[in-house]
Image (cartoon, rainbow, N blue to C red):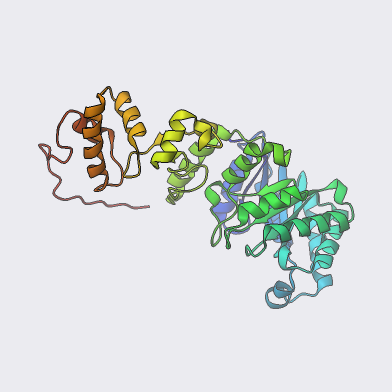
Amino acid sequence: ALGVDVLEAGFAAASPDDFAAIARIAGTLRSTTVCALARCQHGDIDSAARALERAWRSRIHVFISTSPLHREHKLGLSRQQVVDAACAAVERARGLCHEVEFSAEDAMRTEPEFLAEVFSAVVAAGATTLNAPDTVGYMTPAEIAQRFAFLRAHVRGAESVVFSAHCHDDLGLAAANSLAAVEAGARQVECTINGIGERAGNAALEEIVMALKVRGAHFGLDTRIDTRKLYPTSRLLSQLTGQSVQRNKAIVGDNAFAHESGIHQHGMLRHRDTYEIMRPQDVGIADTRLVLGKHSGRAALRQRLAVLGHAPDEATLDAIFARFKALADRKREVHDEDLDAIALGQDPDAQGPWRLVQLNTNTHL
C-alpha cells in the first residue's frame, strides 16, 4: 500500500456511484481513515455517514464558501449565516463519525479576520481538522505562509486541531504553496496522484512527498508514504483514467530520471550525484536512463556499447560515433538495435523482411 493517512473517497450525495464507491472503500481499508465530502446540509452529511458505516476510521469533511465573492454571488448569505451553517454541520457530523474536517471554500480570498472567526466557531463545535483551500490557485508561497501563520495565531483552540492546506495549480504554484503552508504550521496537505483535479489540477502527492523526503533537513518533517510505490501508483492511475503523464513530469514522468545531454551523461557516469538529487529506485523506477540522442557524447556511447557487448578500439569508436551522430540527427532517440547495427557495420535504416503498410486503431471506454 502507498500509505496515505486519509483517503477522501468521494462525495456521497453527488451520485449513487460515488456513494457505492465510498462504501466499498470504507469496507475494505483497515489502516487508513476514509473520508467523505459533504456540503453543510443535513442530507449530505447523513448520506456521507451511511456510506462510511463500515469504515475502520471515518471522517466527514464538511465545507461551505466563506469569501465575500462566494457569499454574495453564490450563497446569498451573510457572515453570520455562514458561521451558523458551518457550526450546525460540524455538530451534526460529529455524532456520526470518528472525526470531522471543516473546509472554508475560497479561504484564501476570505477576509483573514472572518476566516479566523469561522474556524474558531467550528473548533468549538467539534471540528478537529481545519482546511484552508486556495480554491482558485491564486496565492503565492509567501502569502500562503502569512495566512497560515495568522490563522494559527488567531484561531481559538488552534493548538488542539490540525491545519490543512488544499492548493490548486492554476498558476503552477500548488506544490510550492503547499510546502509553504507546511513551513507555516500546516500538518495535513490535501493532494492527488499526478496532480489530477479541477481545472489545472491539485498539488501532486508525489511532489509533496519527495520534497519533504529529499529536503528533510530543511523541513524537519516526513510522511508515512512508501515512496517506492509512487511510480507504480502513478502509472495505475494513468491507466484507469486514460490521462497520460507528461514526459517531463516531476518525480514520475518518463524523463524524470533520463539524461540526454552529453555533459550530464559524462557527469552521471563519473558520479550520479552530479545530476541526480534522488534515486529512481526511491520512487519505484528501475534505474536511471542515459538517453542516446543528438546531444549525447562519446562517454555515454562507449558505456552503452559495452553493455551491449561491443568493445571497439579508439579508431573504430570514432567511426561508430560519427555514424551514431548522423543517425541521431534524424531520430529523437537511438535505440540498442540501432547501436548493434552500427557496431556491426550494418545499416540501421535498412528495411527488414516486413514492411508496415497500414495501421488502424479502434478504442472504446
**Residue 72, image x and y in percent?**
72, 77
**Is 137 located above or below residue 328 in the figure?**
below
Q: Give the camera-side residue of 135 and 38.
A: 135
Q: Quadrant of the N terminus?
A: top right
Q: Residue furthest front?
A: 315
Could one spot residue 287 in this view of the protein?
Answer: no
Residue 162 visible in image? yes
Image quadrant in which you'd find residue 205: top right
- Please give the name of the residue rendered at 62% of the width and 49% of the height, measured from the top-left corner: 191
Question: Which residue is the extreme one toward the left?
Answer: 353
- Give x and y (percent) for residue 346: 14, 33
Residue ID at (56%, 60%): 198
| Quadrant of res 150 | bottom right
Q: Is 256 on the left-hand or right-hand side of 342? A: right
Question: For the point 31% across and 43% down, which residue is it?
Answer: 333
The picture places residue 138, in percent across and down from the top left corner, at 64, 65
Would you say 152 lies left or right of 28 here? right
Residue 336: x and y, percent? 27, 33
Work out whether residue 352 or residue 360 is closer to the camera in this orientation and state it: 352
Above or below 131: residue 306: above
Residue at the spot x=36%, y=39% of the render?
Answer: 291
